[in-house]
Image (cartoon, rainbow, N blue to C red):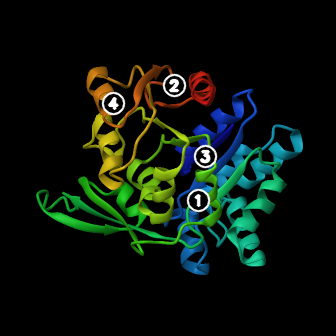
Amino acid sequence: MRIVAFGGGTGLSASLRALRAIPASLDITAIVTVGDNGGSSGRLRLDRGALPPGDLRQALAALADDDPVSRRSADLFQHRFAGTDALAGHPVGNIVLLGLMEQFGDPVVALEHAAAMVRAQGRVLPMCRLPVTLEADIRGGDPARPDDMVTVQGQHEIAVSPGDIEVVRLLPPAPEACPEAVAAVLSADWLLFGPGSWYTSVIPHLLVPELAAAVVKTRAKRLITLNLAAEGETGGLSLADHLGALTRYLPDFRADIVLADGDAVEDPATVGAAARSLGARLALGRLAVGRTVPRHDPPALATALEPLLKAGKA
């Protein structure tokens, strides 16, 4: 079964770890956003003009094999240098990916080599071969002018900005998609969207014209995993609004299943109606670990995903 998962950061990592935990034979491809400009990725992007490696590294670590050598390699990739010198704050894997991309001159080849280093049980691809910049119009982005719209550039700046996001876009406005990512979408059996930062990790894929066209054209089924709680950048959106945002940026977007944690859905009727507007049915399960700061639990997510994926492929 060919699975393509879209996203970035911890949300995509949770999905990939869940897919790895499913005992069925899965061919997994992660398609990762490349707009990060914060932290180590932002520094390397600014200093070296690099494709931001952080979300790519996290996807590789999530797909790493379970044998001791692969796990140690994955742990090494995730190790972050301490201190206050030039290396401080950089994960080892970011530096390795930067070196591989400079050595090979092609991020896809570099990622294939890095995947071999951790014996990744799947493939990691960038959304685009070149970095992009996220830009958003945010109402209330300036606390001194809560009713005014301000334009904010940068994934990190958007994520931490106060106010409500009205529109998000990419710069350049129509970046070229990674051809291997487009091919993976067209040959997939399932496309998985979410969980994750909706405006900065999920929706950006729909703003790449060739990738969006492939999402519409493919015969693959589509599954959306909703977030567990409102986050900073979507504080003004309900779970139903999350689904509506997808068709706002890709009007022809359709889905087959919307998966959500039953404890996170306060109004199943409203979310179910929003799912049906996409052509999907709502599936509820126990997906979370922790209630104070809820996060998706990969084993629980795997338990929920496995029967849905198998039923859809049958």
- Residue ID for mark 1: 182
Query: Camera-side residue: 6 or 276?
Result: 276
- Residue ID for mark 2: 287
Percent across and percent down for residue 27 are 72, 42
Q: CA distance from mark 2 to mark 1?
A: 29 Å
Q: Earlier in the sequence, mark 2 or mark 1?
A: 1
Percent across and percent down for residue 271 are 31, 28
* Residue type at the position of mark 4: Arg
Sort mark 1 into few (<14), some (14-19) or many (20+) by Cα contacts within 10 Å.
many
* Residue type at the position of mark 1: Val
Percent across and percent down for residue 63 are 72, 44
Query: Camera-side residue: 37 or 254?
Result: 254
Instruction: Locate residue 227 relative to residue 87 in the image: left or right.
Output: left
Q: Earlier in the sequence, mark 2 or mark 3?
A: 3
In the rendered view of the protein, which quadrant contains the C terminus?
A: top right
Q: Earlier in the sequence, mark 4 or mark 3?
A: 3
Instruction: Locate residue 195 relative to residue 92 in the image: left or right.
Output: left
236 is higher (above) or lower (below) than 260: below
Q: Earlier in the sequence, mark 1 or mark 4?
A: 1
Foreground mark, 4 or 2, reads 4
